[in-house]
Amino acid sequence: MDMEKISSSLEDYLEAIAEIIEDKGHAHTKDIADKLRVKMPSVTSALQTLSAKGLIRYQSHSPVVLTAAGSERAAVIRLRHAAFNNFFREILKLSPEEANDTACKVEHIVCEKVMSRFVSLTDAIMQRSDCAELRKYLEQTMPQICSDSTEDLVSLDQLAVGQSGIVVRVSNTLRGIKKFADLGLVAGTLLQMEGHAPFGDLLRIRVMGSSLSMRAKDAAHIWLRLTD
């Protein structure tokens, strides 16, 4: 049987209640307010709504109790959060804080089918022997994408043929900056130098599965961090 749709905010309350009960054995309204960093009137309003939907039992000055339906819903929410948290941490190599914050946002908007495919993808990458090279690549590359560090950057025109790098910064002085952005030359994009024209200053760049040509004097305005 399909579960009744509730707002992402109410899902957060259910998740928080379940976690508090697991940690303390009971969940009082103040515990919930502290965990979610919201004011007591907001907690009271949310709990009344959850109670009306049959997901909790709530009375003033008494611990909040999850009903069977509420416990089931909370378990689904927590499983979804754990799955996305694992993906962001282990595959995208985000910090634990970033992974958790991002999972909190994504878990409310992704359906169960998509979540199941995230889980399957994560398991395959982390466990399959034929993904060993991919795991090595992710370990080396992901932390470099959109890193705040500006050390050891090179301009795109300095890449040797076959060398790859991740775009860190694009100078505002680049002519046609919007055109290049539309082609994928933005911070976080992985590029590879495919070749130099035998005459003139044209470069051939591999970006997002396609090849594009650009002048070396324009490429000098794009700064990368090498990946190999």
Image (tube, rainbow, N blue to C red):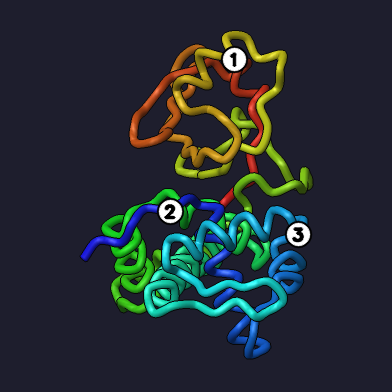
Q: How many labels does the image show?
A: 3
Which residue is painted at 37% across and 73% down in the image? Answer: 69
Does residue 188 lie above or below 210 as drawn? below
Extreme-front residue of the structure: 60
* Residue that numbered label 2 is attached to: 6
Task: Identify the residue at image location x=71%, y=13%.
Answer: 173
**Looking at the picture, which amino acid does disc 1 mark?**
Ile
Mark with earlier residue (3, 2): 2
Q: In the rendered structure, which amino acid carries the disc numbered 2?
A: Ile
Q: Which of marks 2 and 1 is in front?
A: 2
Quadrant in the picture for the C terminus:
bottom right
Front-most of residues 17 and 140: 17
Residue 49 image position (x, y, % from top left): 52, 57
Q: In what element is the residue under mark 1?
A: helix
Q: Position of residue 151 (x, y in %)?
A: 78, 47
Residue lying at the far left in this picture: please name it: 1
Report whether residue 83 is seen: no
Of label 3 and label 1, which has the lower sequence position?
3
Pointer 3 local density, CA inside 10 Å: few below 14, some 14–19, many at least 20: some
User: Can see residue 145?
Assistant: yes
The one of 124 and 11 positioned closer to us in this rendering: 11
Mark carried by residue 177: 1
Residue at image x 54%, y 69%? 15
Task: Give the labeled residue for mark 3.
Answer: 40
Q: Quadrant location of residue 26? A: bottom right
Pinpoint residue 61: horizontal percent, then vertical percent.
72, 76
Circles 3 and 1, Cβ within 8 Å, touching? The answer is no
Front-lying residue, 191 or 63: 63
